[in-house]
């Protein structure tokens, strides 16, 4: 005897399309925390520099150095491989489009 699929999996559960906070937007609490933390950034950077210079542990020095570089220069860009379902590389062309009212 064939088993029937449950109707629940098709109608219930999971996020609805378009629901939730849009990607890239920060909520009010996050913005408030960032504003509170900014005045202490100089002290945090000084602490990281002190760790790079004075720590006896190599792993601590490396972690502090990476944190400083990430904040000063940004994190390295990640490579993304674009392939079709068969695994063939896709060619991407980016064009600048000007929209005038």
Image (cartoon, helix red, strand yellow):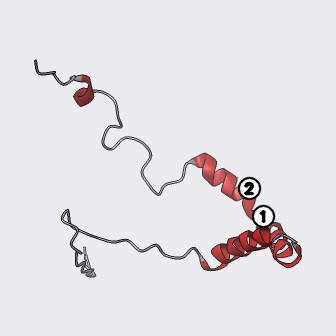
Q: Residue furthest left?
A: 1
Q: Which residue occupies 81% across, 76% down?
A: 52
Q: How far across and how far down the image is residue 78, in percent?
A: 46, 72
Q: Which residue occupies 44% across, 46% down?
A: 21
Vertical order, 82 against 16 (above or below): below
Q: How far across and how far down the image is residue 60, in percent?
A: 78, 68
Is mark 2 in CB contact (under 8 Å) with mark 1? yes
Residue 36: which disc?
2
The quadrant of the picture occupied by the N terminus is: top left
Vertical order, 6 against 69 (above or below): above
In the picture provided, is 62 more to the left or to the right than 99?
A: right
Q: CA distance from mark 2 to mark 1?
A: 7 Å
In the picture provided, is 28 more to the left or to the right than 68?
A: left
Q: Residues within 10 Å of mark 1 (few under 14, many from 20)?
A: few
Q: Quadrant of residue 66?
A: bottom right
Pick whichever, 54 or 26, lies toward us: 54
Q: Which residue occupies 84% across, 71% down?
A: 51
Q: Quadrant of residue 84?
A: bottom left
Q: How many marks?
A: 2
Q: Residues within 10 Å of mark 2 (few under 14, many from 20)?
A: few
What residue is shown with label 1?
39
The quadrant of the picture occupied by the C terminus is: bottom left
């Amino acid at each position: 005897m064939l088993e029937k699929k449950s109707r629940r999996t098709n109608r219930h559960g999971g996020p609805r399309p378009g629901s939730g906070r849009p990607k890239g937007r920060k909520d009010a609490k996050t913005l408030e925390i960032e504003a509170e933390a900014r005045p202490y950034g100089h002290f945090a950077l000084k602490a990281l520099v002190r760790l790079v210079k004075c720590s006896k542990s190599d792993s601590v020095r490396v972690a502090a150095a990476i944190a400083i570089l990430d904040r000063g220069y940004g994190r390295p860009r990640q490579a993304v491989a674009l392939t079709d379902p068969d695994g063939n590389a896709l060619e991407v062309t980016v064009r600048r489009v000007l929209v005038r009212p």
